[in-house]
Image (spheres, grey):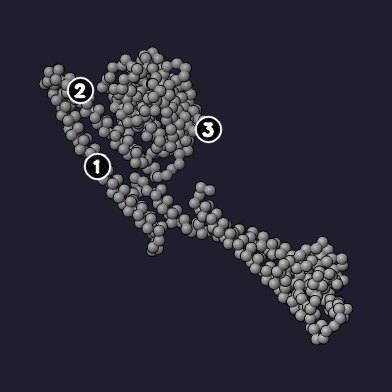
Amino acid sequence: MKSLGSRLTYYYALVVMCTVISTLIIGYWLLRNELIHGIDLLNGAEFSEIRDRVEHEPVAESDFLRKVAEHAEIDTQLYFFQVRRQNGEVLFRSPNMRTAVLEANPPGKANWTTTTSRLGAIRVGQFSEGEFYIQIGTSLRSIQHFTRYYVQAGLVVSGVAVALSIFFGQRLSSLALDPIRRIQQTAQRINADSLSARIPTDGANDEITALAHLLNQMFDRLEVSFNRLWRFAGDASHELKTPLSVMRLQSEKILLDGKLPASQQEIIQQQLEGINRLSSVIEKLLFLAKSEVQGIRPNLKPLNTAEFIQHFREDAQILCEDEGICLEVTRNESFLAMFDATLLRQVLLNLLTNALRVTPKGSCITLASWRDDGRWKVKVEDPGPGLPAAHLERVFEPFARVRLAGEQLRDDIGTGLGLAICRSVIEIHQGSIRAENRQPGPGLRVSFELPIVVRREHSLNELVPTASIRKEEIEGSIYGESVDLV
C-alpha cells in the first residue's frame, strides 16, 4: 500500500476490528460466566427446596431417598439428581439420567462442569445433607445454543464493522488528506509563469496549516529568487547585446568606408565574426536558461509529419549541395502529430550541420521519419568517423565539444550548445534524444522520438524566439572541444 490514504484506511479498519473483536470476546466471556453463575444459583435453590422437605424431623434413609425421588419427579425436565454416601456409594439417580453416573466433585470445588456421553455438558452442584451428598446437575445445552448464536451474531457484526470501518476510514482519510491534496495541487500549478500561486489556508491552528504557512513562505522566497534571476538575465542580455550591437555597427561602418589597408580590414572582419559568435552564444544561453526553468512554451499544432520533413529537405538540400554532399530521405511516413514546427526545424538543422562537418564530399547523409507504437521517430545518420562511446551521452551537455584523434582544434566549429538546445527542445515536447555509432560501419546516428499527442499543461500561445536558419548562424556542438582522444 503505497498510498497514504490506503494506509490510513487500513489502520483505521484494523483498530475498529480489534476493538469490535475484543469487545465481542470479553462480552462472551462475561455473559457465559454470568449464565453459569445463574445456573449455580438455580442448583442451590433446588437443593434448598429438597432440604425443606427433609429437615423438619429425622427420617430414615429410605424415607430420605423417597422424598428426594418425589421432588426429582417434579423437576425431572430441568435437573438431574443423584444421592451418594460420603464414601462415594451412589444411592439414588433420577430416572432422566438413565445409566449415567455423576462423578464426585473435584477437590475444593462445590460447583463444576462435566461431560457425559449420554447427557452432554452438565453443570453440577454438590451439597451436603447429613451423611448424604446431594448432586444436582443442569444441562448446559441452552448455553451452548447461546454460544452458537452469539458467534453467528459476532460474525455478522464483524462483517458489518469491516464494511463500515473501510467506508468511514476512506472518508476520514480523504478528509484528513484534503489539505495535503491542496498543497500538492498548488505545488503542481507553480511554475515559471505562476510563481504567485499560494496554498489556501483556513483558520485552523493545526500541523497541516502550519505546514501550509511554511510552504507559502518558501514559495515567497522562491518567487523573489526567480524574479531576481529573470531580472538578472534580462539585464545581462541587454547590457551585453547593446555594446555588441554598437561594436558590430561601428566595425561594419569602418569596413564600408574602405579607408583601411587590407591587413586591418581582415582584422575588423575577424572582429565582426567574433561579435556575431558571441551574440549567438548569448541567445543560446538564454534559451537554455529558460528551458531549465520551464519558461518556454512550444506552439503545438497538429501538423503532417511527411510535409514537414519534405519542406525541411528542400531547404536542407541547399546546404548539402554547397558542401558537395547529398541528403537522402530513406523513410517519410505521413501522419498527424502535435509539435512546434519552428523548434523541431532548428533541431534538424543543428543535427544536419553537425553531420555536414564530418561527412566526406560525395557521400550522403540519410534522414528517416516514421511512426512506431504511438510515437514519432526521426533519425539522422552520417558516414563520418563517429564518436568514442564515452562521449555519446556527454555531447548533449552545454559547451561539450569533442576533438577526434588527429584533428586540429578550430575556432569555427561551434559553441558546444547546439545539441544541448536540441535536447531541451525535445524534452519540451516530452520526448527523448540519443546518439549512437552506426553498426555496422563508421558513422554517427542521432535519433529522437516524440509522443504523437503531447499533453498540454500550459497555454500554448507564445512563440519561442529561435535562431535564424542562415548557414553562417547555425552552430553545432559535437566536434570541437579540446579533449584529446586516443
Image quadrant where one finds the C terminus? top left
- Image-based side of 121 in relation to 322, left or right: right
Q: Residue furthest left?
A: 259
| Helix, strand or loop at mark 2 | helix
Q: CA distance from mark 3 to mark 2?
A: 50 Å
Q: Determine the residue positioned at 39% across, 21% down.
A: 388
Tell me the residue that label 3 is attached to: 373
Q: Position of residue 79 (x, y in %)?
A: 80, 73
Vertical relation: 139 (above or below) 196 = below
Query: Quick one: label 2 or label 1, which is nearer the N terminus?
Result: 1
Q: Is residue 346 visible?
A: no
Vertical relation: 157 (above or below) 272 = below
Q: Which amino acid type is shown beneath numbered disc 2? A: Gln
- Between 207 and 152, the one lying in front of the other is 152
Q: Tell me whether circle 3 and circle 1 mark residues in contact (CB < 8 Å).
A: no
Q: Which amino acid type is shown beneath numbered disc 1? A: Phe
Report which quarter residue 461 is drawn in: top left
Q: Determine the residue positioned at 75% across, 68% down.
A: 105
- Between 5 and 436, the one lying in front of the other is 5
Q: Determine the residue positioned at 16% across, 27% down.
A: 251
Q: Which label lies toward us, 3 or 1?
A: 1
Q: Is residue 289 visible?
A: yes
- Image-based side of 409 in relation to 376, left or right: left
Vertical relation: 37 (above or below) 414 = below
- Residue 270's tag is 2
Q: Which amino acid type is shown beneath numbered disc 3? A: Asp
- Residue 232's tag is 1
